[in-house]
Amino acid sequence: MISKDYTSGQLLETEACTNCKICADVCPAVGASGDGKVSAIYRLAYLRDILKRKRGLLSRIFKTKGTSIEDLTAYSDTVFRCTLCGNCQEVCPVGIHLKDLWLNLRQDLVREGSFPKKIEMIKGNLDESRNVFAEDNEERADWVEDMRNAPKHGFIKKRDDIVYFTGCVAAYFPLAQKIPIALAEILQAAQADFTLLGGDEWCCGFPLLGAGLMDMFSEFREHNIGAVKARGAKRVVFACPSCFQMWREHYDSGIEIAHASQFLEELAIRGAIPFKETNLTVTYHDPCDLGRGARVFDAPREVIRSIPGVKLVELPRNRENCRCCGGGGNLGKGQKQSEEDKARILALELANALPNTAKIKLCRDTEEQDWLISLYKDTGSFFELKQFTWNVYQESPQPFLVVERVGKAGLERHLKQADPGMKCQVIDPTRPDHSVRDKSNTDERRDRPTR
C-alpha cells in the first residue's frame, strides 16, 4: 500500500476510531448483506493494520512481511462493495472524514493492482469514448428526439447563459432518459433558455472518482470547463446529483452551478412554471450525493410543495439520515455480491416507505426484460416496479422485492411463498393499454432497448 495516497490528517484519523460501531449500524451494505467486513469499522481497522506493517518501526527493524496479494484482493472486495453513501461519516462521533478516506483507499488499491475487473472496463470506456457506457459521444443529445415538441436546434446552441449538463446515465440509459426529457419540457414551459453541450460534453468524472482512477480526471475537468466557457455560459445546471457533486467539489471552475431542483425552485418562486393541479401523495428520497454530500435538502421539497394538490409525505429516514438507494459506488454490475447487496438496500428502503406512501416507482436496469409489475395487498396499498427480474424476500415486517434474475413463470410462486396475501398483475408496457400479457406463454421475452 502507498502511504502517499493519504494526507497526514487521514493517517492520524485512522488512529482516532473509538470502535463504537455506530457506522456499522447505519451502513446500507452491512444491513443488506449481513457481512460485517463491508463496514467502515472493519475497513478502517484493516487499513490501519496494513499501514502499520509498512511504516512501523518494528516492521522496519524486523523486516515484517507486508500484506499478501491474496489478503489484499479479499480486502479490496470489501472496499469496493461500499456504496460511498457517506452515512458512516455523517454519524461518526469523532468526526473522521471517512468518505475521502474510502476514495483515497480505492486509488491506493488500484495502484497496487488489487481491484475489480470492471475498473478496467470503466477506464477503457472513458479513455476511448469519453462516456462510461462506450457509446458514441456524438449521440449524447439524441434523447431530445424523443421529446414531444423538440425544437429544431435540439437545444444545441453556440451561445447561451445556461448549460444543462446531462450526464452519462441520463444521456444514454433508456429508462433514465425520462429525466432530461422532463426537465427540458419544464424549462420550455417556463420559457427558460438553455443549451446542451452535445458531443462536447464529456463524463463529469464521477466514475473515475469511485473507481480510484483520479489520475485521469484532470483531462475531463479541463475539457468540460472549456466547453462551457466556449458557449459564454454563466451557469451550469445538473439533474444528476453525482455530476453536480463532482463539479461542486472537484472543478473549481469559477462558473456558477446549480442542481435542477434549485433552479426549478427559483422558477417556481418567480411564478414562471405553469403548474397544473394534481391530486397526488408523493414522497421524496434524498440522493446521497445531493443530500449528505451537497447538503441540498430544501429545494426539492419546496418544488414539490409548489405543485397544487400534491401532498408530500416524508420517508421515515430523510434528509441527512436518508437511507442509501444502493446505486452508488459505480461497481454494482459485474459484481454479483454488490448487485445482491444493492437489491436488498432498495428493498429495505421500499419496506420503510410503504406505510407512508400511496405509490412508489423504482427503476432497475437488467439486460433481459422490461416489464411493469403492479403488486398490492388486500389493504389496497400498492407500488409499481419497472423491470420483471425481481424476486421476493421476507426479511422485514413489510413485504418487498429484491432484484434477481428469475423466470417469469416463477413470479407468482415466489409471491405466494413470501406472503399469501399478496396479489400480482404482470403488465406488458409495450401495449398502449398496458394490458395483461398472456401468462401461458412463460418463455416470451423482450430485450432491453439499446442504442
Image (cartoon, grey):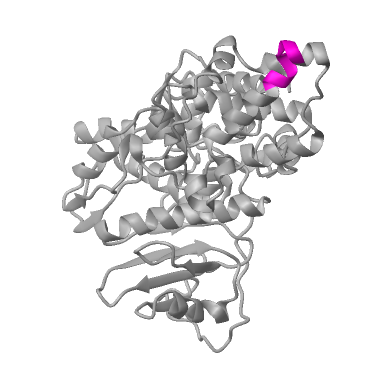
Residue 174: percent from left, percent from top? 54, 54
Residue 363: percent from left, percent from top? 47, 56
The C terminus lies in which quarter of the figure?
bottom right
Residue 231 shows in this picture? no
Magenta stretch: residue 161 in it?
no
Instruction: In this rendered view, identify the residue nearer to me: 183 or 74.
Output: 74
Residue 330: percent from left, percent from top? 60, 41
Q: How many marks?
A: 0
Instruction: In this rendered view, identify the residue nearer to me: 206 or 98.
Output: 98
Vertical comparison of 44 with 74: above or below: above
Vertical comparison of 35 with 412: above or below: above
Residue 327 shows in this picture? yes
The image quarter containing residue 281 is bottom left
Instruction: In this rendered view, identify the residue nearer to me: 240 or 341.
Output: 341
Vertical comparison of 112 with 435: above or below: above
Magenta stretch: residue 52 in it?
yes
Q: Which residues are magenta?
A: 51-58
Magenta-highlighted stretch: main secondary structure?
Answer: helix
Residue at x-position 52% and y-position 67%: 390
Residue 27: percent from left, percent from top? 47, 41
Q: Is residue 38 left or right of residue 321?
A: right
Residue at x-position 42% and y-position 28%: 92
